Image: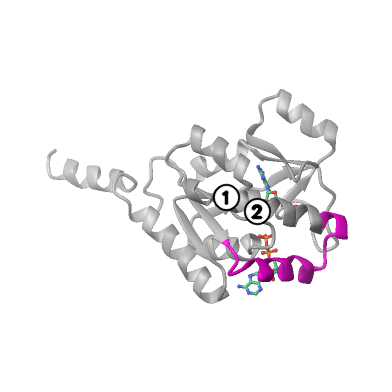
Amino acid sequence: MPTQDEPIVFVISGPSGSGKSTLVPKLLELPNTMFSISCTTRRPRATESPGKWYDFVSEEEFDRMVREDAFLEYACVFGRHRYGTPRKWLDLARERGFDLVLEIDVQGAGQIRRKLPQAVSIFIVPPSRVELERRIRGRGQDSADEIARRLDRARDEMKCFKEYDFIVVNDDLDRAGREVQAIGIAARCRNGHARRVVENILEAFGG
Ligand code: ADP
Ligand code: 5GP
């Protein structure tokens, strides 16, 4: 039911290990929803194939995209690698009448908020600091150095929680998934969003 004038842009953030990548597919289960594949200069992990969650690009390619203003937002995350949201996904979402899901850090979320104030932002948090560390280590995909950097950064990221529209505590995965979906459904029912349907009906009544 593509009823909207403009796609809803969902922004999902939270510290590394909070469960963003686990919960994003729950939001994508809603019909007419698509994922914004970010570009990153970080190397792929063993389990990651290019073009699914990320397009892995060189520093030069990333520079070129910045020069060409190809990003809706971009940031250097963990002081190391750069990540960015190509504008083309928003254009495609608009073309398809789909909503768009961005999984980005707190800096990128700030940029989106300024450019697209209607964006719906969700902050994912772990149930505790101990559990966060357990999840990052348990994932077993980052070096000891990288884990330390991510834990260090988690504290600063957590302090940004007030800037988000919604907070989802990811303790029980099923419940957290339902909450994320409920936010998506509620956003679609918001007054203003399905305006065109109402306008069409009023028009059919003769205005
Ligand atoms: P992020 O994308 O925020 O870095 P992930 O989605 O990769 O986090 O989750 C980090 C780890 O925690 C993964 O191994 C994932 O399977 C696990 N995880 C995610 N949510 C839960 C949960 N509710 N309970 C237990 N483990 C979880
Ligand atoms: P990871 O390396 O674990 O995949 O992601 C590291 C961090 O980069 C996460 O906080 C993730 O949300 C963020 N990130 C991923 N893609 C983007 C993006 O396009 N822009 C910004 N600003 N951050 C991103």
Task: Identify the mark at residue 155; answer none if there is no mark.
Answer: 2
Q: Residue furthest top?
A: 67
The spot of residue 34 in percent (x, y) is 56, 53
Task: Identify the mark at residue 104; answer none if there is no mark.
Answer: none
Q: Determine which residue is flagged by label 1.
A: 159
Disc 2 to disc 1: CB gap under 8 Å: yes
The spot of residue 113 in percent (x, y) is 50, 38
Q: In the picture shown, does residue 136 fall above or below 98?
A: below
Q: Who's the residue at 68% across and 45% down the image?
A: 38
Residue 177 covered by magenta stretch: no
Give the residues in magenta: 125-146
From the viewer's perspective, tell me whether residue 83 is left or right of residue 163: right
Secondary structure category for the residue under label 2:
helix
Q: Who's the residue at 81% across and 33% down the image?
A: 61
**As shown in the figure, which amino acid type bears the numbered disc 1?**
Lys
The spot of residue 90 in percent (x, y) is 55, 40
Q: In the picture shown, does residue 139 fall above or below 192?
A: below
Residue 130 covered by magenta stretch: yes
